[in-house]
Image (cartoon, grey):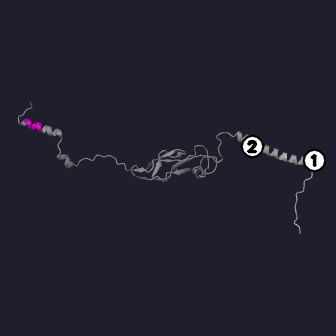
């Protein structure tokens, strides 16, 4: 047995109409593709600056509130990108942090759900549907700054001390009774 040998069969020139039909088909695909591309360009080039994604929330509706019960934000709810000034509810206590940041809304996922806002605000273009809780790591403890107070001296020590004025008066009385006069 001899191995079978396959050879390329030369293409015979075909009639002119087949070549013309093949060329027109290729041209039609190219024109359709170019038309689809050019149809998208106006929307891409004329997109307004500052446009936002479909999931973005109404401006200034993303807010943070304090998470604990032993302290609070003196400002109440604070807007995204600002800070909360922490104040303990017991005035004898001091917070471990005086300010807590409220994360800003970036409008980008970045792998962190837009700094955690996706979980709070939910998907949509309306107002943010919740408030992010911040400050859960803040602890209120007894303040280490002692107030300066003056403690009065005990009554027994006050009685044993004479004032300078009473000593002068007593000396004048003694010298007057002895008949001594100042020169």
- In the rendered image, which residue does mark 2 sit on? 40
Q: Position of residue 91 (x, y in %)?
A: 40, 49
Between 33 and 82, the one nearer to me in the picture: 33
Q: Position of residue 177 (x, y in %)?
A: 6, 36
Q: Position of residue 61 (x, y in %)?
A: 58, 45
The residue most toward the left is 179
Of the numbered discs 2 and 1, the one sitting upstream in the chain is 1
Q: Secondary structure at mark 1?
A: helix
Lateral position of residue 120 relative to residue 183, left or right: right
Picture disc at residue 16 = 1
Q: Residues within 10 Å of mark 2 (few under 14, many from 20)?
A: few
Residue in the image at 82% along x and 47% along y: 29
Lateral position of residue 164 relative to residue 71, left or right: left
Question: Which region of the structure is painted magenta?
Answer: 171-176
* Alpha carbon separation for disc pair 2 and 1: 37 Å
Residue in the image at 9% along x and 38% along y: 174
Residue 59 versus residue 8 in the image, above or below: above
Picture disc at residue 141 = none
Residue 173: in magenta span: yes
Examine the residues drawn in magenta and state their main secondary structure.
helix
Q: In which quadrant of the rendered image does the C terminus lie?
A: top left
The residue most toward the bottom is 1
């Amino acid at each position: 047995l001899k191995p079978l040998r396959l050879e390329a069969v030369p293409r015979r020139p075909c009639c002119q109409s087949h070549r013309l039909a093949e060329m027109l088909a290729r041209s039609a695909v190219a024109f359709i593709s170019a038309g689809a591309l050019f149809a998208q360009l106006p929307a891409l080039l004329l997109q307004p600056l500052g446009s936002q994604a479909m999931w973005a929330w109404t401006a200034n509706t993303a807010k943070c509130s304090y998470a604990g019960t032993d302290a609070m934000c003196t400002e109440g709810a604070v807007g995204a990108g600002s800070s909360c000034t922490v104040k303990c509810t017991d005035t004898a206590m001091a917070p471990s942090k005086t300010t807590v940041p409220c994360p800003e809304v970036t409008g980008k996922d970045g792998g962190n759900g837009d700094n955690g806002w996706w979980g709070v605000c939910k998907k949509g273009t309306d107002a943010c549907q919740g408030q992010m809780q911040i400050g859960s790591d803040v602890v209120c403890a007894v303040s280490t700054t002692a107030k300066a107070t003056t403690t009065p001296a005990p009554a027994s020590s006050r009685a044993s001390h004479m004032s300078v004025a009473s000593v002068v008066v007593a000396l004048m009385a003694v010298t007057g009774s002895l008949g001594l006069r100042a020169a």
